[in-house]
Every structure is written in structure tokens, then in C-alpha cells.
Image (spheres, grey):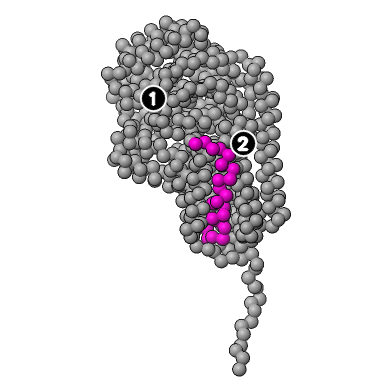
């Protein structure tokens, strides 16, 4: 007797269906490889072309997996990437925060895990909603740009090490950020990676979530990525051709940048206060014959509260009077009656007579460095960097008015926040001035990464930016992002450069801000809503 055969189901499984594959060693290695390659695109080593293909291994690892497994793969890749890019955080905490190596390594790991979460969310959402290769290709760039924006604003924000930032040496392509911000460049990089991944999957006969990328899609994706990249480079060439003569004809401000190269371990030592102060004065007076209009000293170049230490203040003011020009000086400041003092990380504009012509107070403070967040609920937490009291924040977007040019100071890592420079330019800033002390980071890659981030502020707003750093890197960046002067690390330096003032142009980015990543978030949300009923 023949066995009774089961009837064929009315709804057979579609050809595109696939059985999710668990994470194996090969997939994890591919994900980690993406983290390593993308880290290599940033200083140092700064192999920026790697960014255009670094995510391909992660794309391959994500094929035919569940969203939960995709999250774990993305988290692993992102965490490793961040560990390699911001490893210097642990160095700073050990050297200047006095933390044991184990504790500093733990803090670095936790912070990298937090940043890696964004990679994990990207991977999970891409797998969940990008079931078809074409949808994945369209969704991925918007998801990535939107998530970078969220990282820039959530929990005080940390817009450091975005994919687009790796392209600072690629002068032609970064010009597009005056429209989209750095997020448009990250969008383009992810699109290129997706197109390359589809080529690799198709060539190897592999599927994406059970579907093989069609030859037409593979050709179209590559053509689209190439066309948009060419358009970005073409826009950069046109913008450079348009602005170069404007920059050449613009009035210039002879600006002197003084890099005193004071070791961080000695900077606040009372025994070295006089010597540190005199070093900045001597370097500045050596520039007198070059007739600078403005001399810029770095963040907290005066290792005391200006106008509260009478002897050291007289020393500084005497040096300014002997030099005979305006000075912009980084100094801590103090306001309020005894017992109710408020401390600020400030920049003073002092005229040739030594009189205060303006002051800017840092608006975006460093958590656990300049203030302790959630102190009421976390009283056991101290600051990583010891200072006298918590600093108060100034007004975002504030300027220092000056008859020669309205100055937009950005103190230390304020230069990594595009909204601060944008607000200053909208208020009329003709020159962006970054005063910083990167001595904390030693000879790590952090000073190079920090300098590259400042370059984007100049391009986004088409303003010149000058940067004075205690131990470097100091330099001058023109409105096209060209670095026209640059010092080394841990050297005494004083340079004078004519800085073009292009103060009558407002870019799309300056006017509209982060419209591009917000549009990406909306587009990604619409795709998710449209596909929300798809089976997981």
C-alpha cells in the first residue's frame, strides 16, 4: 500500500524566502574587518580612500541573517572601529585624570560600546526593512546619515569620527558640505559601499536576504554611486573655481598664531606660571616686526584667572602694550561675589592698551572635564580633569564684536559641533577662531583628528578659520578648506598669515542647518512604516 502524500500547500514558499543563518566565525571576522578598515581611513594612518569600500565586508556578513544577529554584527564592527579611532581617551584619563589603566580601559570600552550601538541599530534596521537588495541599497545611506545626526545631538552629542570626516584630504569632494553638512558625504560613502557590496555578492552567486542582486540592479547601483560621486567632485571643482578669485580679492587680516608648547603636566603648576606666561609674551613680541593685526593665544594660555591674579595680569598686559596690537587670549575667568563665583572657560579680546574689548565664554562644556552631568543623581562621580570648581556655560553662537571683523571663537572641542559655528556665522562672524589645548592627547591621533574636524567648519560656512593650539596643531584654513599654514606637534611656533575675510556669503548649510540628515530620518521612517507589516 502506497503511503498517502501530503497535498502541496496553497501558498508555496516564494523563491526569495531564505532560512536565516546564524553568526559564525566567518561573519564575525568580516564585520570586525569593516571596523578595522574604516578606522584606517581616519588619522592616523589616514588612508581616506579606504572609507569607500570599508563597509563592504559588513554588508557581506549581514546577508541572510536575522535582525538580532545583524545588530550584534554591527555592534561588534562599530565598537572595534571606535576603540581604534578614539583609543586616546584612555591615554588622557590615565595620564591626566589619574585613573588606573583598568578603569580607563573600562570607560573607553563602555563609551565605544555606546558609539557602536549606532552601527548595530543601522545593521538591524537594514536587515529588517531592506529585504530586497534594491530597498537595502536605497535605505542604507539614509539610515546611516540619520543615525550620525542622532549621535551628534543625543546625550550632549559627540560628532567625532563620522564617515565623511575621513575625507578631509579629498578637497574636491568635501565642498558639498556647504549644502548637506558632513552627513551628505557620509551618505555618499555608504551608497558607494552598498553598490560595491552588490557587485561582490552578484559576482559570487550570493544572495541578500534570499534574493540575488539582478545584473540590472548591480549595473544601476554602480552607475548611481559613480554618478553621484562625480557630481559631488564636479560641484567641488565648480565651487572652488567660483570662490578662489573671491578669496584672492577679499580683504585680509594679518593674524598671528602663537603655540607656546607648554607641557600639560606643568601648565597649572604654580612654580611654572611665570615662565609659561613669559614664553607666550616673548613669542608674541618676536612677531612685532611683522605687524600682525591680531595675535591669538590658545585655550587657557594664561594659567591663572585673568584680572584676578594681579602680578601675572600686569605681566600679560605689559607684553600686549609692548607688542602694540590686539590679542585674543584664552583664559579662565571668574564672575560673582565671594561664595557665589561662577567660573568660565573664556577668550578675551584685548586692545593694544591692554583693555578688555570683548569676551566669549565657552558654551558647550566637556562632560566630566568641565562639569559633572547629573551631579544631583550621581554625586559620587568626580571630574576626569581636576579644575577649580565646575565651569558655567556661555551663550551658544555668541560673538566678539570688533571693528576689523566679528570674531566667532570656538574653544577646544566646540569646533567639532557644526551648529555652534553655524550660529556664529548667522550672527555675522567674519572669522572663526578655534582656541584649544590638545596637550591632553599627547602624540596620539587625536590632535590630527581634531584639526580635520575644524576644517569642516570653514567649508560648511565659507569662512576662514584660524586655530591656535598650545602644543599643536595650529593653522589657518581658508573658506575652501585649504590649509594654508600648519604647525607641527610639540614645537614652539609663532606664525603670521594674511587671512581672507569672506564675510558676506551665506551657504545653504548656514541658512538651513541639518536639513539633510533630518530628511534622511524622515525618509527612513517612511520606508519602515511602509514595510512594517513584512514578516520579520
Residue underneath mark 1? 344
Q: Which residues are magenta?
A: 45-68
Asked whether 532 or 342 is in front, the reply is 532
Q: Residues within 10 Å of mark 2 (few under 14, many from 20)?
A: many
| Residue 23 visible in the displayed image | yes
From the viewer's perspective, is residue 114 above or below residue 385?
below
Q: Is residue 142 visible?
A: no
Which residue is at the front of the view, 277 or 61?
61
Indicate the quadrant containing the C terminus: top left, top right, bottom left or bottom right: bottom right
Q: Is residue 243 left or right of residue 389?
A: right
Q: Residues within 10 Å of mark 1 (few under 14, many from 20)?
A: many
Tell me which residue sits at (27%, 18%) in the image: 271
Residue 433: give x, y in percent of width and height: 50, 22
Q: Is residue 265 above or below residue 138?
A: above
Local SS, label 2: helix
| SS of the residue under disc 1 | strand
516 to 386, vertically: above or below: below
400 in relation to 510, above or below: above
Which quadrant of the structure image shows residue 310?
Answer: top left
Q: Residue furthest bottom?
A: 1
Pinpoint residue 285: horizontal percent, then vertical percent: 43, 9
For residue 180, which numbered disc appears in the image? 2
Residue 393: x %, y % from top left: 42, 28
Compared across the picture, whether 334 is left or right of 271 comes to: right
Amino acid at each position: 500500500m502506497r503511503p498517502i502524500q501530503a497535498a502541496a500547500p496553497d501558498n508555496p514558499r516564494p523563491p526569495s524566502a531564505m532560512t536565516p543563518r546564524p553568526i559564525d566565525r566567518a561573519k564575525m571576522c568580516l564585520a570586525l574587518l569593516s571596523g578595522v578598515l574604516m578606522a584606517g581611513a581616519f588619522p592616523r594612518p589616514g588612508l581616506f580612500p579606504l572609507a569607500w569600500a570599508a563597509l563592504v565586508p559588513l554588508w557581506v556578513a549581514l546577508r541572510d541573517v536575522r535582525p538580532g544577529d545583524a545588530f550584534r554584527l554591527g555592534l561588534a564592527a562599530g565598537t572595534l572601529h571606535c576603540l581604534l579611532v578614539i583609543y586616546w581617551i584612555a591615554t588622557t584619563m590615565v595620564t591626566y585624570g589619574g585613573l588606573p589603566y583598568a578603569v580607563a580601559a573600562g570607560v573607553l570600552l563602555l563609551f565605544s560600546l555606546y558609539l557602536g550601538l549606532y552601527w548595530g541599530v543601522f545593521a538591524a534596521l537594514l536587515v529588517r526593512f531592506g529585504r530586497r537588495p534594491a530597498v537595502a541599497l536605497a535605505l542604507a545611506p539614509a539610515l546611516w546619515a540619520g543615525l550620525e545626526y542622532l549621535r551628534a545631538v543625543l546625550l550632549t552629542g559627540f560628532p567625532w569620527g563620522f564617515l565623511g570626516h575621513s575625507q578631509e584630504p579629498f578637497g574636491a569632494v568635501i565642498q558639498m558640505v556647504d549644502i548637506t553638512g558632513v552627513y551628505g558625504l557620509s551618505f555618499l560613502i555608504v551608497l558607494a559601499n552598498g553598490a560595491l557590496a552588490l557587485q561582490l555578492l552578484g559576482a559570487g552567486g550570493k544572495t541578500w536576504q534570499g534574493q540575488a542582486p539582478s545584473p540590472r540592479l548591480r549595473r544601476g547601483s554602480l552607475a548611481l554611486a559613480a554618478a553621484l560621486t562625480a557630481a559631488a567632485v564636479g560641484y567641488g571643482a565648480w565651487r572652488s573655481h567660483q570662490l578662489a578669485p573671491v578669496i584672492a580679492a577679499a580683504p585680509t587680516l594679518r593674524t598671528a598664531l602663537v603655540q607656546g608648547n607648554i607641557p600639560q603636566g606643568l601648565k597649572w603648576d604654580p612654580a611654572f606660571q611665570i615662565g609659561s606666561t613669559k614664553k607666550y609674551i616673548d613669542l608674541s613680541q618676536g612677531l612685532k616686526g611683522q605687524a600682525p593685526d591680531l595675535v591669538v593665544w590658545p585655550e587657557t594660555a594664561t594659567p591663572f584667572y585673568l584680572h584676578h591674579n594681579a602680578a601675572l595680569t600686569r605681566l600679560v598686559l605689559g607684553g600686549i602694550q609692548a607688542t602694540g596690537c590686539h590679542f585674543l587670549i584664552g583664559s579662565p575667568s571668574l564672575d560673582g561675589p565671594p561664595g557665589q563665583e561662577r567660573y568660565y572657560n573664556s577668550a578675551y579680546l584685548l586692545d593694544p592698551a591692554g583693555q578688555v574689548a570683548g569676551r566669549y565664554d565657552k558654551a558647550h562644556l566637556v562632560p566630566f572635564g568641565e562639569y559633572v552631568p547629573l551631579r544631583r543623581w550621581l554625586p559620587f562621580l568626580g571630574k576626569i580633569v581636576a579644575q577649580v570648581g565646575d565651569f558655567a556655560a556661555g551663550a551658544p553662537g555668541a560673538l566678539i564684536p570688533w571693528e576689523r571683523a566679528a570674531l566667532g571663537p570656538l574653544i577646544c572641542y566646540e569646533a567639532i559641533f557644526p551648529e555652534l559655528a553655524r550660529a556664529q556665522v548667522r550672527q555675522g562672524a567674519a572669522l572663526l577662531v578655534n582656541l584649544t589645548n590638545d596637550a591632553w592627547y599627547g602624540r596620539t591621533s587625536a590632535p590630527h583628528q581634531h584639526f580635520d574636524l575644524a576644517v569642516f567648519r570653514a567649508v560648511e560656512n565659507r569662512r576662514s578659520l584660524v586655530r591656535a593650539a598650545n602644543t599643536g596643531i595650529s593653522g589657518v584654513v581658508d573658506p575652501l578648506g585649504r590649509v594654508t599654514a600648519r604647525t607641527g606637534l610639540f614645537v614652539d611656533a609663532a606664525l603670521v598669515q594674511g587671512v581672507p575675510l569672506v564675510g558676506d556669503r551665506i551657504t545653504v548649510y548656514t541658512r538651513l542647518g541639518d536639513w539633510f540628515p533630518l530628511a534622511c530620518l524622515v525618509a527612513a521612517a517612511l520606508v519602515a512604516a511602509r514595510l512594517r507589516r513584512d514578516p520579520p
